[in-house]
Image (tube, rainbow, N blue to C red):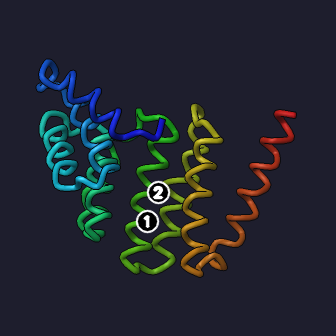
Amino acid sequence: MARPDLSLDLVQQVLPNNEQENYIYGMLSFPLLELGRMTEAEKAAKKGYEINKQDCWVHHNLCHVLQYDCRFKEAVEFMKECSSLWDPCSSFMVTHNWWHVALCYLEGHSPIQTILNVYDHCIWKELENPDAACPEVYLNALGLLLRVHVRGEIDAFEDRLKTLANCVTDQVSYRT
């Protein structure tokens, strides 16, 4: 609904009965960060992580906070440390978490080859998973390519952009 205020209200209603559940802190953290309440969002994400270090939504939310604070190196280190836990996640969540890692590298002025490596080996590679949801992978791949384009670095990704365009075109042709 794009209404983090309503989401926050709902989570706060059920929080008292779910204080030992990690998922509630991921649900709490996200609307807080969307409302710009980063200190509270970070605290909620860390509480969820303390309860369950495998919660990929908590990983995602904490990365958002670290990115917002321009703590790119810390965000990358944290996400890479957690990345082995993302295998059971949906294609969207796996590639979206890696998208965040790539953005941290990009915003932190890492070499473009580092971002290419994340794209190739962490985002696009998800398509090798027999259970991969291709449109979910394409969405995060495209999101990264758009960010790279805004930074004026799209030339390094030209072949990947063409491959993605062909895949999306094939996907659309298949559905029509």
Q: Which residue is mark 2?
A: 99
Q: Give the residue drawn at x 64%, y 72%.
A: 157
**In this picture, residue 35 sits left or right of residue 111:** left
Q: Is residue 164 above or below residue 111?
A: above
User: Residue 148 appears in which quarter of the rendering?
Assistant: bottom right
Check disc 1 and give the amino acid type: Leu
Whether the residues at callouts 2 and 1 have beta carbons within 8 Å, the answer is: yes
Does 97 appear above or below 134? below
Residue 29: x, y in percent? 25, 42
What amino acid type is highlighted by mark number 2?
A: Trp
Give the structural element (helix, strand or loop) at label 1: helix
Image coords of residue 77 (percent x, y) = 26, 62
Q: Nearer the viewer, residue 81 or 165?
A: 165
The residue depicted at 58 percent of the width and 36 percent of the height is 132
Mark yes or no: residue 54 visible.
no
Residue furthest out toward the top: 17
Separation of residues labelled 2 and 1 (CA atoms): 6 Å
Q: Relative to 172, is 105 above or below?
A: below
